[in-house]
Image: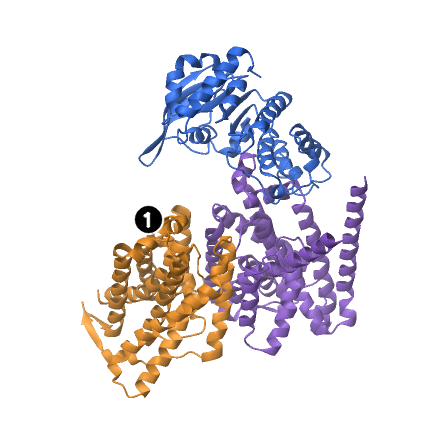
Chain colours: A orange, B purple, C blue
Amino acid sequence: METIVSIIFSGVFNASTLFLVAAGLQVVFGVQKVFNLACGSFYALGAYFGIVVVKSFVAGGFPKPLFIVPLIGAGLLLGFIGPIVERGLIKFVYDRDETFQLLLTFALVMMIEDVIKFIWGTSPQTTGGIDLIYGRINLFGATLPVYNLIVILCSLIIAALIGYILLNTKFGRIIRATADKKEMGEALGINMKMVYIKVFTLGTVLGTLGGALVIPATAVVSEMGVELIVLAFAVVVIGGLGSMKGAFIGALIVGVLKSVAISTYPELEMLTIYIIVIAVLVIKPQGLFGGSKV
Amino acid sequence: MKPWQEILSLKSTKVLILIVVGLLFLGLPLFASQYVSYLMLTFFAYAVMVLGLNLLFGYTGLLSFGHAFFMAIGAYTAAFLTGKFSILYMEVILVVAVIISSILAALIGAICVRYIKIYFAMLTLAFGMLFYTFLLKFYYLTGGDEGMRVLRPYLLGFNLSEIPKMQYLTRSYYIYTLVILAILTFVMWKIVSSPFGLCLKAIRDNPEKAEYLGVSVKRYRWYAFIISGAYAAIGGALLAPAIGQVDPGLTYWTHSGTLVFMTLLGGFENFFGPLIGGVVYIFLQDKVMSLTTYWRFIFGAILAFLVIVAPGGIAGVISSLVKKEKGGE
Amino acid sequence: MVILSASDLRKYYGEFCALDGVSFKINEGEFVSIIGPNGAGKTTLINVLTGLLTPNTGKVFYKDKEITGIGPEKLSKLGVARSFQLVNIFPNFTVLEFLMVAVVSRLGKGTNFYSSLLRDQKVTSEALEVAMLFGLVGKRDVLTKNLPQGDKKMLDVASAFALHPEVILLDEPTSGVSTSDKNKIMETLVSASKKIGIKSIIQVEHDMDIVFSFSDRIIALHQGKILSDSAPGEIEKNEEVVCTVLGQKECFKIFSALMHEHTGKGGKA
């Protein structure tokens, strides 16, 4: 029981950041139809920047337990990359073949990887276990770090927020309309340029925030972004491309599966995930929630 | 009849250029440094892979983001046969690589060719990564992230273990690989200019219409996938003795991206484009890497530039310049 | 002899019923036109007949063989070909290469991996033959994306003919072409089909002059149902029905077409 709880808990924790990145992938794919391989790179950027901010926050003599505030701020702040990348690169390929869009985001992956190496070097970095400041609690007999609970909570709040925005705001309606039909937005006289910038920025922020939130509980390595994109891809394939609900469920499946595999057969960790991805693509190529829009 | 003569003479000029380039490559080790010859050798191996990749990408319209999978199959075949089974005949290695990769490509292809565009790209990526984790985790078999050593193979039955390593690589093995590349280039040329090649191009341009004209779209994509996988495996098997050590990084998805990069750089719309891309990529990478450790940033920028401004690659730019010149006359 | 038949075809797109119990038989040697206002289900019908779409209920037969939802590739091998309403081409192909695709697949040469296409006399000459029938020989080496609109359309049709089918379905073969050219195109089609040995032609067409002067039979669709199915001469009996289907403008056209017929100017091909 105790181990089952901690396995599931760590799976849900995996899922919570995975969901953020996958949601960023989905929203951009839904509106712009661009599959952004660089979403994992945004995640890595968020992680590295998060470390810098937390360290200087602590060095500045601010109360340690409040570190989560500047951490979230760091994730949000990095959103400024969104408009730059969108206006500087992505906007040129909207009416091009999907394969070229994919290649452009691959170019972005290469560039961001080196930007990270240039700024932060190649050695792994941590926040020095600052997450343990919140201590641990006992739940169903298992001892769980409180910080991880907070991250799960943050992720749930963001999920609810996204759901609210999509369903109840004008911006959300525009997103859903354009996801249905690209011409729709233009036909309604909406400034699509602004919509594209906003959506891409939203996608970026979700990635950077995911990276920032995860970092106190783990170490950063320069390949983390490249590795995450493969996981995020697994999530959206299982959940269904373009579906937010799919990203949520897919993230849970992948996250829990990953932690189950790690604690039982570590050799099979990623293997199981890829096999499930392939199985889903073969049996139900549109994913579990494909067809339902964003 | 005049246009025919023109075409004929045009064809013979092209053949002449090819022969000259071939002879230049052949004679290169005589006047170039060993290092340059070595880089050229790796290019020959990559050239075989991108020839195969472009049958899928340029001719059939399918972007594989997991093609490094098949090259790794070829490379690990070489490592296993030489290291674990003491089979050192290069010809045997190549044949086994072709057999294994064709079987795997037939199985994987049967699944992948049901999808196109992003789904195809991502599914191939997933298979590549599946193999990557397999290589990494089953270390008692594959050596894990350290990989495996590749012993020096016999060429045409000759044991060349007495020759110094660089001399072996830049002379005997160099010529051996070049000849195989020449043969495989010729075979690929025949394939793309066959009725089958025409059907592939039809599928690329408009699969729906092709189907109405009686072309079995999925079956032909499957054939292309298998041929392409076998080419990549041959390239991988040729590369393995040249680098002397194989590791899981060969099948990582960014390495698949490198193959696509080469193809795009040279020009996927042109038969020889990927080969041009391969040679430019390898020498450019060598140059840029010697100048800065941040070569990926520069290459990323080049790729972005290519995608946005010159999707036809080097060959595309050249042919549009030639056209302009002709138009100006 | 019946060559193509449909029984009780129904096709739904969600709530919308595009075909609502369509049945008919096409005989060998017939030229049948399908008419009806936009949204009547004409293109859906063609798509169902050619196996691109599977109907919710009902069956399609070619001779004695059921071909419901069989898919385009198998259909073309059986001897049924079609052309498209919107231009459907291989943009980067020359005219000759385009036609070669059809010839290669008809001759079963698609899996020739290693023979040279250019040296294949049979494929080249048969492709040229079809190009000749449709007046495209002069443009044999032009890239299809650089062709004028009318020629693109012709090429699409020509490639279907190059399959040497027994039945051909043409979805608005003359749309987007000037009225003066329409008759010429139709005459080309009819004479080409005779030379190739096509037994029956089914076409969707809006131009009533064309419909009345070339068809043996006219099937009028409205809201997914067959309103009338008769020879052009008999359409007077259904005139009222047809007029409600086609609206005032077309109604006037039919009258004028009928007038032509009565004064002996029209006539079947």
Residue C28: percent from left, percent from top: 53, 17
The residue located at (34%, 69%) in the rendering is A209
Q: Does dot 1 land on a helix, a strand or a loop? A: loop
Residue B170, located in which quarter of the rendered image?
bottom right
The kind of residue tagged 1 is Ser
The residue located at (70%, 55%) in the rendering is B324
**Does any portion of residue B138 appear in the rendered image?**
no
The residue located at (69%, 73%) in the rendering is B35
Residue A18: percent from left, percent from top: 34, 64
Mark 1: few/some/many CA within 10 Å (<14, 14-19, 20+)? some
Reply above or below: A19 against C94: below
Q: Which residue is mark 1?
A: A292
Left or right: A233 in relation to A6: right
Residue C126, located in which quarter of the rendered image?
top right
Chain for numbered disc 1: A
Question: B138 and B207: which one is in front?
Answer: B207
Question: A160 and B90: which one is in front?
Answer: A160
Reply above or below: A224 against A257: below
Residue B154: percent from left, percent from top: 69, 63
Q: Quadrant of the N terminus of chain B?
A: top right
Residue C157, located in which quarter of the rendered image?
top right
Residue A116: percent from left, percent from top: 46, 75
Tag count? 1
Question: A262 and A121: which one is in front?
Answer: A121
**Does any portion of residue B14 appear in the rendered image?**
yes
